[in-house]
Image (cartoon, rainbow, N blue to C red):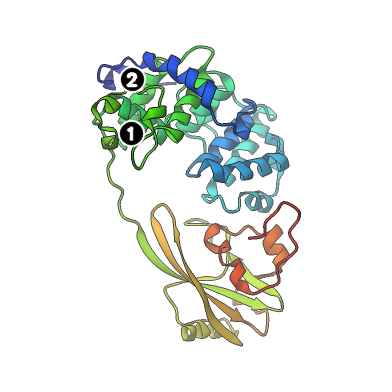
């Protein structure tokens, strides 16, 4: 890694970080969860898992990961798959730019090295969607390099271990912790050490309440445990409250089909499918007026259900109306696709914000293939 700050800039509060290595490795080898991406250290498998796990719980990721790897088992397969199919595999995971960046990176790898995965930290960082954390995870787990992967879990563990008073939201703090960890990476066990830190933060040194210190292999070294200050760390600036927005979702139905359209490129959920979604909390009369503007009218409009959907910085208060249309119309400029239930189930990837309204369409449910659930 280049241009790392000196590890002495990170105050370990008297703790020699090298002391955590042996007990942490022993604990990990005995207690690590059995997860499908830990079956081997193939860099493609590690990469896909790390991208999926960003902002997403492990128990949510497992079935997605298994389905993804069964369909796209290699870099080449990922590079060649149609975007619509890729997004369908990703449907419900959210943060769809992750999937698109995966494919962009796969195409770069195929173009530049014939599908051979880059093996250095610097090369990994050059891939679309791969930042320092993901590059460190791949470099250490797949290639055995002494490169830390420092995320929120690891920041929390180190902050409690050392009672570090600095704000972990500061980029300099993360860089300093990363540099300090890099000095103690054990040769020949770099991948296990990275995963042991991740695992400790995920299942023992947990956020939002008391950590499970009785199960922690590092409790005798931990200053926060010694002083009973676990809940005071890590120090972190409070996030700004999310912006609230009201949305009206139109479940337009005609002849056993429902209307969907693609959102504009760029911005929130850019380029993804949606049920027509209008700004504001519209009444049935306002929806009827909107339809008239599109050169259409409704035989029946009824309020179906309301849901909230939370994004990182904004919260949508969504109200859906089921609208029966006598004709499958197209507004000026087109853009609507009148999809069958089978297309909604098998082909069209709807983000979770909209997929949750599919049951309210009132359309016949298609027969689900064995082992597959229709949303």
Please tell me whether mark 1 sits on a helix, a strand or a loop: helix
Residue 348 falls in which quadrant of the image?
bottom right
Label 1 Cα crowd, 10 Å radius (few <14 / some 14-19 / many 20+): few
Residue 54 picture location, percent across and down? 49, 41
* Residue occupied by mark 2: 220
Distance in Å between CA atoms under marks 2 and 1: 29 Å
39 sits left or right of 95 in the view: right
Residue 294 in view of the camera: yes
Among the two numbered marks 2 and 1 on one chain, the one whose residue lies closer to the N terminus: 1
Residue 87 picture location, percent across and down? 63, 51
Q: Residue at x 73, y 64 (%)?
A: 342
**Camera-side residue: 279 or 208?**
208
**Camera-side residue: 362 or 238?**
362
Q: Residue at x 60, y 29 (%)?
A: 38
164 w.r.t. 252: above or below: above
Residue 313 picture location, percent across and down? 38, 54
79 sits left or right of 262 in the view: right
69 w.r.t. 298: above or below: above
Label 2 Cα crowd, 10 Å radius (few <14 / some 14-19 / many 20+): few
Residue 174 picture location, percent across and down? 35, 30
Q: Quadrant of the C terminus?
A: bottom right
Q: Quadrant of the N terminus?
A: top left
* Residue occupied by mark 1: 171
32 w.r.t. 144: above or below: below
């Amino acid at each position: 890694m280049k241009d790392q700050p000196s590890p002495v800039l990170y105050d370990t509060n008297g703790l020699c970080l090298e002391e955590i290595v042996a007990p942490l490795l022993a604990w990990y080898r005995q207690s690590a969860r059995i997860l499908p991406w830990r079956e081997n250290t193939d860099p493609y498998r590690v990469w896909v898992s790390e991208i999926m796990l960003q902002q997403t719980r492990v128990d949510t990721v497992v079935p997605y990961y298994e389905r993804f790897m069964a369909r796209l088992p290699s870099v080449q397969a990922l590079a060649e798959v149609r975007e619509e199919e890729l997004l369908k595999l990703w449907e419900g995971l959210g943060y769809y730019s992750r999937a698109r960046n995966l494919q962009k990176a796969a195409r770069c790898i195929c173009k530049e090295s014939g599908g051979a995965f880059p093996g250095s930290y610097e090369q990994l960082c050059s891939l679309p969607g791969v930042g320092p954390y993901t590059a460190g995870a791949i470099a250490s787990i797949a290639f055995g390099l002494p490169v830390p992967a420092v995320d929120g879990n690891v920041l929390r563990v180190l902050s409690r271990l050392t009672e570090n008073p600095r704000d972990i939201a500061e980029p300099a703090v993360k860089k300093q912790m990363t540099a300090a960890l890099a000095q103690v990476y054990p040769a020949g066990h770099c991948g296990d050490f990275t995963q042991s830190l991740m695992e400790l933060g995920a299942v023992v040194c947990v956020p939002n309440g008391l950590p499970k210190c009785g199960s922690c292999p590092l409790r005798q070294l931990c200053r926060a445990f010694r002083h009973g200050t676990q809940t005071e760390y890590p120090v972190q600036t409070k996030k700004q409250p999310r912006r609230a927005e009201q949305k009206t979702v139109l479940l337009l139905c005609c002849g056993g089909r429902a209307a969907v359209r693609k959102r504009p490129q760029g911005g929130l959920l850019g380029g993804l499918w949606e049920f027509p979604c209008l700004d504001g909390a519209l009444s049935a009369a306002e929806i009827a007026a909107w339809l008239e503007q599109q050169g259409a009218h409704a035989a029946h409009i009824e309020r179906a259900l309301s849901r909230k959907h939370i994004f990182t910085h904004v919260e949508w208060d969504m109200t859906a109306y089921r609208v029966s249309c006598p004709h499958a119309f197209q507004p000026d400029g087109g853009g609507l696709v009148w999809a069958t239930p089978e297309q909604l189930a098998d082909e069209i990837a709807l983000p979770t914000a909209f997929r949750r309204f599919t049951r309210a369409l009132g359309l016949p449910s298609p027969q689900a293939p064995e082992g597959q659930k229709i949303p």
